[in-house]
């Protein structure tokens, strides 16, 4: 019998885990290569996962409803088509983790050490090995190796945690990332009866810091390494009073928290704002709406903005880039991430419109509308959320003047568009005289990474966007 492992796939660059929602085959059933085998749900997409090979499903290692890390073995398929032999499911062997997964806010990321750790031969070869069959009990080291991943052991070592003291909630008692982080958080919360801790040194206003919520009624304290130094940062407890409602964050909110905290720690954020006259676009949109409506397409201001962004990125390609360590990667394709609010505005997802620089105004409109609909109906697939090179987020749809968005890593810039509304402004009449007129105006805010983009380039880029929108060609469809 030749068995092939089936793993939990990584459905996105920042996805660390997935929930196996339903098995589409049972043990003993045959399955064809690329035939749907099970369903998963992640922070960003729901998807049917095909079988990697043809054969017979002989083992199911992850039950429906369980959430596991990417690359976890969830099943095994016999490629020789033999009958399923009854056996007790064994813990899945954890595969190599190719790159460190960002932990929750309790642990800052050592950006310098992460790439090295990911490429060390020793780390690449490390994976929990099944304990050898012996008559004697497992050693302490064997228990730890068999019930933890390299990532978990790395976190434990950095925080001086003995994994034997941590209760695992994973398969067969495996200690998961959430288990170790919860243990560290609980240990950091100082009980009221504990000796008073040494007062924490003051933290400068510009110093980055990571924190995690302390347990109610306890004064938590985190040790946060910053540029080689360790700061003891006190975390005040949140009082919970009668009538308050407490709920756990959703997986999407937790992943958003991780991604945003990472971005604030990694990038040197600066925001520049420009005011744009939309009067010409308002009139052009009104003129074009009937033509688009004839094809069942709703024309919004978004495609005009995307067209202007594309033209600006062509002229200033440094904003269509990503940072890879100490290297700047200039992307050939212009793939626009479009932030979409879902779950009644409680969550945010960013599908990606690929090759936006090759699309007409009609193509941008249909592409953006299709992605927004798929996001709201939770039918996005992996290809819809990967590969973004620049992101646009629209706070104006909620009536806001403008916002200062956080950069979507590893990109170097993000544009926040404000509400388009009538305002009194100074304009020139046909005689060249300054007069007060009523125009449709909007504020655009560009947040950029000052490690790569300087203020002058950001200003030039915003001015280009402004110029395209205020002089949008009449014949573009």
Image: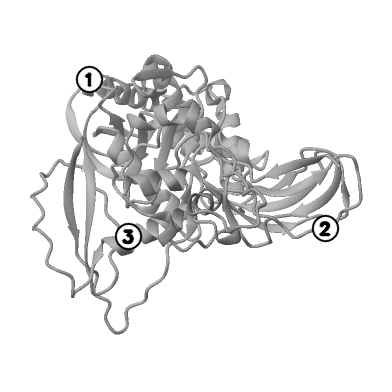
Name the element at disc 3.
helix
Badge 3 density bin: few <14, some 14–19, many ≥20, Cα 10 Å: many
Residue under circle 3? Answer: 185
The quarter of the rendered structure image containing the N terminus is top right
Residue under circle 1? Answer: 456
Q: Position of residue 105 (x, y in %)?
A: 33, 51
Q: Evaluate whether residue 419 shows in this view.
A: no
Note whether 192 is above or below 422 in the view shown: below
Spatial separation of the CA atoms under disc 3 and disc 2: 40 Å
Q: Which mark is residue 42?
A: none
Cβ–Cβ under 8 Å for marks 3 and 1: no
Q: Evaluate whether residue 465 shows in this view.
A: yes
| First-in-chain label (3 vs 2) | 2
Q: Position of residue 198 (x, y in %)?
A: 9, 58
Name the element at disc 2.
loop
- The extreme bottom residue here reads 242
Mark 2 against mark 1, which lies toward the viewer? 2
Name the element at disc 1.
helix
Residue under circle 2? Answer: 26
Cβ–Cβ under 8 Å for marks 2 and 1: no
Location of residue 408 by image quarter: top left
| Nearer the observer, 439 or 457 | 457
Taking the image as shown, residue 262 lies to the left or right of residue 45, namely left
| Nearer the observer, 142 or 150 | 142
Q: Position of residue 141 (x, y in %)?
A: 49, 49
């Amino acid at each position: 019998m030749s068995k092939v492992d089936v793993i939990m796939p990584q459905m996105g660059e920042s996805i660390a885990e997935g929930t196996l929602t339903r098995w589409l085959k049972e043990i003993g059933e045959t399955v064809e290569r690329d035939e749907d085998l099970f369903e998963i749900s992640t922070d960003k997409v729901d998807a049917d996962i095909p079988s990697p090979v043809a054969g017979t499903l002989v083992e199911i290692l992850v039950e429906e409803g369980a959430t596991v890390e990417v690359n976890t073995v969830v099943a095994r398929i016999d490629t020789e088509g033999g009958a399923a032999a009854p056996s007790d499911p064994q813990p899945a062997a954890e595969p190599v983790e190719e790159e460190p997964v960002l932990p929750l806010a309790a642990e800052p990321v050592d950006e310098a050490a992460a790439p090295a750790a990911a490429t060390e031969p020793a780390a690449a070869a490390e994976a929990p090995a099944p304990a050898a069959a012996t008559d004697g009990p497992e050693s302490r080291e064997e228990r730890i190796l068999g019930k933890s991943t390299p990532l978990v052991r790395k976190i434990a070592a950095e925080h001086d945690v003995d994994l034997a003291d941590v209760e695992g909630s994973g398969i067969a008692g495996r200690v998961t990332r959430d288990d170790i982080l919860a243990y560290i958080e609980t240990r950091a919360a100082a009980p009221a009866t504990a000796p008073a801790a040494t007062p924490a040194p003051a933290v400068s206003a510009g110093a980055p810091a990571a924190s995690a919520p302390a347990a109610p009624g306890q004064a938590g304290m985190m040790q946060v390494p910053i540029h080689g130094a360790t700061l003891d940062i006190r975390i005040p407890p949140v009082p919970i009073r009668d009538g308050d409602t407490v709920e756990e964050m959703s997986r999407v909110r937790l992943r958003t928290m991780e991604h945003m905290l990472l971005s604030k720690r990694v990038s040197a954020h600066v925001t520049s704002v420009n005011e744009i006259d939309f009067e010409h676009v308002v009139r052009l949109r009104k003129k074009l709406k009937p033509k688009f409506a004839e094809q069942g397409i709703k024309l919004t201001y978004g495609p005009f903005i995307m067209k202007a962004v594309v033209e600006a990125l062509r002229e200033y390609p440094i904003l269509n880039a990503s940072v890879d360590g100490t290297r700047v990667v200039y992307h050939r394709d212009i793939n626009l991430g479009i932030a979409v609010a879902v779950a009644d505005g409680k969550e945010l997802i960013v599908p990606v419109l690929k090759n936006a620089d090759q699309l007409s105004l009609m193509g941008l409109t249909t592409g953006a509308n299709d992605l927004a609909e798929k996001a709201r109906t939770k039918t996005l697939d992996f290809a819809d959320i990967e590969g973004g090179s620049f992101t646009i987020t629209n706070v104006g749809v909620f009536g806001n003047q403008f916002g200062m968005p956080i950069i979507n890593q590893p990109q170097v810039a993000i544009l926040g568009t404000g509400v388009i509304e009538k305002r009194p402004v100074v304009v020139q009449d046909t005689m060249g005289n300054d007069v007060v007129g009523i125009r449709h105006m909007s504020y655009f805010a560009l947040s950029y990474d000052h490690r790569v983009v300087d203020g002058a380039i950001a200003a030039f880029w915003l001015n280009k966007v402004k110029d395209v929108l205020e002089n949008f060609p009449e014949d573009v469809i």
